Image (cartoon, grey):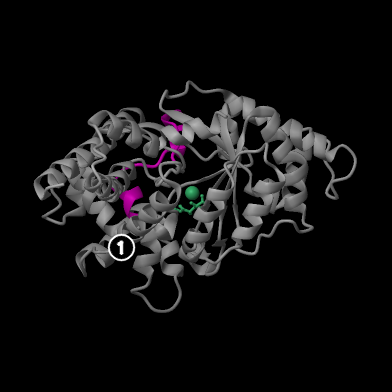
Amino acid sequence: MSSERHATLRQIVHEVVEHTPVFDIHTHLFDPAFGALVSWGIDDLLTYHYLIAESLRWTRGSNDFFWALNKTQQADWIWKQLFIERSPVSEACRGVVTTLRLLGIDPKERDLAALRKHFESWSAETYTDHILKIAGVRKVCMTNLPFDDSERVVWERGLKRHPAFVAALRLDPLLLEWDKTAAQLHGWGYDVRGDLSGKTIDEVRRFLADWTRKIDSQYCMVSLPPEWAFPEESVANRLIQEAVLPHGREHGQAFAMMIGVRRGVNPALRMAGDSVGEADVESVERLCAEYPDNQFLCTMLARENQHGLCVAARKFKNLHVFGCWWFLNNPSLIEELTRMRLELLGLSVTPQHSDCRIMDQLAYKWAHSRPIIAEVLSEKYSDLADSNWQVSRAEIQRDVHGLLGGEFERFISR
Ligand code: FIX
Ligand code: ZN
């Protein structure tokens, strides 16, 4: 194909990827009906835990001074460290600058007090709709934690849900902190015992069924440490095998595993103190092999695991790989992973989720990922065109819809 036709194809692919609405399959955002739990605006953007970790690198000694500040003061301090005293080149810093641009705010005066004014006139509801439009996001999946008191009361009180927000049931406390969670479940009227005896498994299944219905969950999920192994005798594995997977088969809930996080490696950073470790892909393969009637979603945090995970997904059709999680959500790694995944898995993958915690971040995270996905995809279409396989615009639109959430919807509805 001539270089001119390659250029036209590339332009069409970029256009299609830019304009295709996304289903963002894993975020920590809340439906605006959750009120005070919704995070948005410049102070929340600046106090994102990625930026806390980056800014505290410029200090010596204890971090206590930072934790003693209120949110506005923390934002002031981070702004000074990462945006005034040096240039904001990291991906998380660049995200703030991109967000301001997409909101139509000119940051060139570098005046945080003036920037704050732009966020004053919105409510959580109007702001959410504004951001969804700017980001081109059609559906947002939350991470829902009934074990968290402030979230549970909202579900129990009842809420009028925003049409773009769907729920997913997060199971970390159930699977990883069973002793504490058993006491909680007991207090809510589930007849469970710490040693899993008696009616415990049935009662955990009753709890899962109750909350799946209450929140209309799309899937259930857990984050796991790199040491997680299957099979292996552990409370988490017993609960997975005897409660979560039977529940998944009965209620059509895929089980998402986010593997490779080492929590609290530096407790002085609080929620910014988690790290990464290489995990065991073979455990994922063994789980998929033993439970062919369950659907598994998986993302892994270590770069070293990405190739093995793609190969595992080639072997098991009940395994769907998603996202460039957390420390992988950087342009160079998104490109590498997306290329590897398309080459090994074709279009049966969800290349990206945003993991946003602050509503505004939807704008930058997708604005940063879309051109990379488009570039890799257009390279693949160009290679095909060299052998005279021309893709039509409609075919490109079909493919991109699949990559940006459509394929995920098909996978979880099987
Ligand atoms: O466990 C998770 O879902 C992680 O994504 C978060 O806990 C993490 O803090 C995060 O925000 C990563 O992007
Ligand atoms: Zn997350």
Check the image and report above or below for 106 versus 92.
above
State left or right for residue 196 relative to residue 332. Answer: right
Q: Position of residue 231 (x, y in %)?
A: 74, 56
What's the amino acid at mark 1? Trp
Please identify the residue farthest to the front as the structure is shown: 387
Residue sticking out furthest to the left? 4
Mark 1 = which residue?
77
Residue 243 showing in the rendered view: yes
Q: Residue furthest bottom?
A: 60
On whether residue 286 falls in the magenta region, the answer is no
- Near mark 1 (Cα within 10 A), the count class, few <14, some 14-19 or many ≥20, is many
Q: How many marks?
A: 1
Closer-to-camera residue (390/230): 390
Where residue 107 appears, as percent x and y from the top left, is 15, 52
Residue sitting at 44 percent across and 49 percent down?
323
Q: Position of residue 216 (x, y in %)?
A: 57, 26
Q: Where residue 30 sits in the image (x, y, percent)?
A: 45, 36
- Does the stretch in magenta take in 39? yes
Residue 179 visible here: no
Quarter in which the C terminus is drawn: top right
Which residue ends up furthest to the right in the rendered image? 198
**Residue placed at 70% from the left, 39% from the top?**
245
The magenta stretch is: 29-47
Asked if disc 1 is less than 8 Å from ligand 1, the answer is: no
Q: Does 319 sit left or right of 52 as displayed? A: right
In the image, is 53 to the left or to the right of 135?
Answer: right
Asked if residue 101 is positioned above or below residue 23 in the image, the reply reads: below
Is disc 1 placed on a helix, strand or loop?
helix
Q: Is 326 left or right of 291, judged from the image as shown?
A: left
Q: Residue at x 70, y 40 (%)?
A: 244
Front residue of this view, candidates 315 and 89: 315
